[in-house]
Image (cartoon, rainbow, N blue to C red):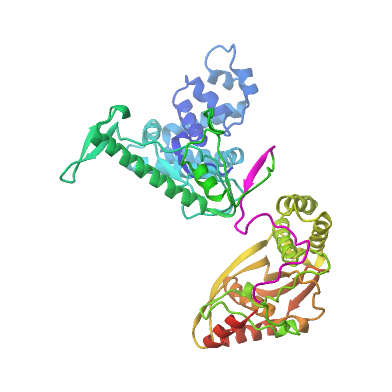
Amino acid sequence: MAGADRLVVAEHIAALDLMALGDALLSSDDDLALASVLKSPLFGLTDDDLLRLCPRREGRLLDVVATGDGSIAERLTRWRGEARELRPFDFYARVLGRDGGRRAMLARLGPEAADVLDEFMALARTYESLEPATLPGFLAFLRRGGAETKRDMESGRDEVRVMTVHGAKGLEAPIVILADTVDLPKARTSGGLLHVPTSDGATVPVLAPRKPEDPPSLAAARAAVTARELEEYRRLLYVALTRAEDALIVCGAETRAAAKDKTHARPAGCWYELVHAALIEEAEPVPAMGWEGEVLRWRKSGRTLAPAEGKLSAPVAPPPPRPARLEDLPPVLISTEAIRPSRTAAPAFRPPADGSLDPRVRGDLVHRLLAGLGALPEDQREAAGERLLDHVAEQVAPHHRAEVMAEVMGVLTHAPLAGLFGPHSLAEVPVVGRLTAADGRLVTVNGRLDRLAVTGDRLILADFKTDRLPPQSLDRIGEGYVGQLALYAAVLARAFPGRTVEAHLVYTRGPRIHVLPEARLRERLAERLAEPSGDTASRRRDAP
């Protein structure tokens, strides 16, 4: 758990433990502070340990500790002397650094505590620049200050981040959960006052105790405040809805009983109701994952992906003639200024005539599985893949799902591809950069690479293809595919200078791997960047 995006330093458990240490060292009679320190990560005693020390003792807890564990008594004695002689920053620096306090706190409290400890020490420096540097003064400074720290939530740690919507502005995550969506904001009045506009355009603060007693002018002012709150509430919903990269989960807990004429207790206009009303027509009920019941699921691409069991309907316009050879397909550039490599050389689609799985569905499932399973331990991949197929392809026939799973596992377990799925690899890597065309134009490359691995002095690029009949030799590979990887390689070579770039085309049927020669990549890249803008636009319109 990553914790909240904003933390009040003096209220976090790490700071409370350090403050309790100061209290215990300053007053030998403060048994509660000493007990808190003993149970903190600084000493690591448990409740059972304290129960052996505290009940039925005679005198202070400090005296009992002094007759027990010698290491605890010795450390407390050393810290008491240093607390009286050193500045607060120097004292706590020794506790956290020399004596391992920081390491112990991070081990128990997690990485979140690092931000609090850093801010705690920064506050010690700030206090010393403002007041005489004493430990009692610093503790009082902390307790009256209410200092906050805003944590860096954009770090790529494997954690669940708990954030306010305001704090999430500008950030994204693969999965976002909106956990509190069934309450409406309450109109806030500063000290019970509403600012009522006057005829000359000024505002006058007026006491507004109870809404039923509002005169017309006060009721209008209260309505304006409520309208502003609702407007901001809906703006924040837009921010929340746009934080997710892959999946957004909207939920909430109703804390009161529903009225007799309603099936729920959600107020009209709450986030949940707004999202529900917008998507209900296109959403579908599906079994919930992890608990009983159903949830409503909406996809940007429509309802659940399902295979075409019969013949697909004919397209409105007849497709252009299919070239005799794949390599004869013309390269496609999105524009003279922007190249999307993954959209080049897409062969014309032919519906399956033998009852096999729709190639579009099969390709989508294979790419999803390869992206999601590659980072998992080998013994967990197949089970995780089955769960993913249960979730996204429940309407695909079992034998088709088995074929897809076998194909994916064949790629993941293929020894020559082990480096692609190692600890230094990533799936679905966005590739964005600029290259200089032959005529001096700056051309933007914008695409997504299926797999990237950085191993020592090598940079391995892999693009997965699900063609039913993989080419058996390099000379049978379409130039569009080569151009796609050439663009990726050129951009990534600039991002990772000094590394040898290897471009792999991995055909999942088999699997069959083709390593594209560096000379061919350079040649194809030069051809792509030498294409005039007029010819490029013409080919874009005529390309299949």
Q: Residue placed farthest to the left in the image?
A: 200
301 magenta-colored = yes
Q: Position of residue 280 (x, y in %)?
A: 57, 48
- The residue lying at 59 percent from left, 39 percent from top is 104
Res 168 visible: no
Q: Position of residue 465 (x, y in %)?
A: 73, 70
489 magenta-colored = no
Q: Position of residue 288 (x, y in %)?
A: 68, 42
Give 515 or 369, whichever is nearer the viewer: 369
Give 147 or 133, whichever is nearer the viewer: 147
Give 11 or 230, whichever is nearer the viewer: 230
Q: Does residue 7 appear to the left or right of 404 in the view shown?
A: left
- The residue lying at 71 percent from left, 68 percent from top is 313
Res 85 visible: yes
Viewport quadrant of the C terminus: bottom right
Prevailing SS of the magenta stretch: loop
The relative height of residue 293 versus residue 30 in the rendered view (above or below) is: below
- The residue lying at 30 percent from left, 37 percent from top is 222
Start and end of the magenta stretch? 291-317
The relative height of residue 166 versus residue 487 in the rendered view (above or below) is: above
Q: Position of residue 135 (x, y in %)?
A: 40, 33
The relative height of residue 154 versus residue 208 in the rendered view (above or below) is: below
Residue 428 sits in quarter: bottom right
Q: Does residue 221 appear to the left or right of 429 in the view shown?
A: left
- The residue lying at 75 percent from left, 80 percent from top is 477
Badge count:
0
Viewport quadrant of the N terminus: top right
Q: Does residue 403 appear to the left or right of 533 in the view shown?
A: right
Residue 343 sits in quarter: bottom right
